[in-house]
Image (cartoon, rainbow, N blue to C red):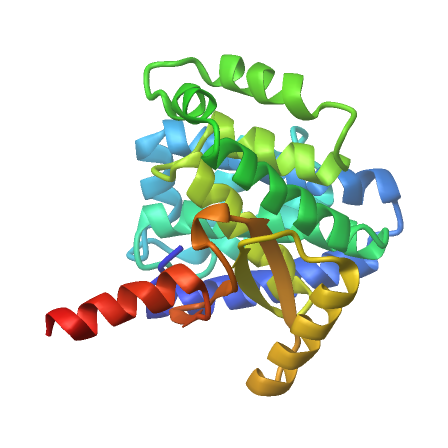
Amino acid sequence: MTLHAASRDALAAAELRLLEVLDDTGNATVVDGLGEELFAVVDLLTGQIALRRALAENSSEPESRERLLRGLLDGKVSAATLQVLTTVVTARWSSPRELVDGIESLARTTLLVRAERAGRLDAVEDELFRLGRIVAGNHELERALTDAGAIGAGKVALVDSLIAGKVDDVTKTLVDQLVRAPRGRSVVVGLGELAALAAKRRERSVAHVRSAVELDAAQQDRLEATLTRIYSRPIALHVEVDPTLRGGLLIKIGDEVIDGSVAGRLAALRRDLAG
C-alpha cells in the first residue's frame, strides 16, 4: 500500500485512535467484531464511488463528513467502529482511494492485534506465509482465486474448503477478505503482504529463505540468530525448499538478496565468463 503524505498522517492518527479504542473497550465481543465491521465498510465504499468521494472531500467541513458517516452507519455498526471511522473521515486524505486503503489497513491491524493478544500472532503469520506458498505452487488454484470474472463468494467458498477448521479465525478472516475483494492485488502478493504485516506487528523483518534441502529447527534458529546479528534487528524466517538451487541458500530481505546457492554461484560464474 502506497500512501501520499496527507494520507500517511491521517492513517497514523486513525491507528492511534484504533489502539485507544481497543484498549478502552471492555466488551470482548465488540473488539472481536471491529475488524469485520471495518472490512464491511471497505466493501461498501469500494462499491459506492460517490460516497467515498463525499467522505474524502477535503473542501467540505470535517463536521459535515462526520454527519454523513453517522447518518449512514449509526445503529448498523458498534460504537467502537464508529469512533474509529469518525477519526478517519474527519482527517485529510490525499484521495478517496487512499481513504479506503486506510480503512482496510485499520481492519487488518485490528485482527492482528486480536491475534497478538491471544498469543496467536506467530501462528497467523506462519499460516499466511504457508498458504501463500501453496497458492503460488498450484497454478489452477491461483487462477481460480484471481479470476476477475468469478463471484467473490465462490472464491471464498473455494479457499474455505482448503483452510476452514485448519487455521486461526484471524487468518481465515484476513484470507476471506483478500479473495473476496483483492482490490487490484494478486492473491499471492496479498498473502505475502499480510504475512509481512504480521511480522511487522512483532517488530521483525522478514527473511524469505529458499533452501535446497529442508532446514531443521536448530539450523533455522542459527540462521535467524546470524541474520539478527548482521542486521541489528529481529529477523523472522519464512523458509521454503527449492531443489532447483542444487545446494545452499538464497535469502531475500526487503530489496536485498544474499545468494549462497550453488545455482546462484554458477549463474554468477557464467556472467563473469560471458563478460
Measuring 77% from the left and 37% from the top, which residue is drawn there?
A: 168
Q: Would you identify the image quadrant in which residue 275 lies?
A: bottom left
Q: Residue furthest front?
A: 273
Coordinates of residue 218 in the picture (x, y in percent): 78, 66
Measuring 49% from the left and 28% from the top, which residue is drawn there?
A: 179
Is 211 placed above or below 273 here?
A: above
Coordinates of residue 8 in the picture (x, y in percent): 42, 66
Residue 111 in sight from this viewpoint? no
Number of labels in the image equals: 0
Residue 58 in sight from this viewpoint? yes
Q: Would you identify the image quadrant in which residue 74 lies?
A: top right
Is 75 placed above or below 18 here?
A: above
Is 166 placed above or below 201 here?
A: above
Q: Is residue 30 left or right of residue 154?
A: right
Quadrant of the drawing holding the N terminus = bottom left
Q: Is residue 24 left or right of residue 252?
A: right
Coordinates of residue 17 in the picture (x, y in percent): 64, 62
Measuring 59% from the left and 37% from the top, which residue is drawn there?
A: 131
193 and 248: which is toward the camera = 248
Coordinates of residue 210 in the picture (x, y in percent): 52, 56
Q: Is residue 88 left or right of residue 228?
A: left
Q: Is residue 168 left or right of residue 244?
A: right
Measuring 60% from the left and 48% from the top, which residue is drawn there?
A: 108
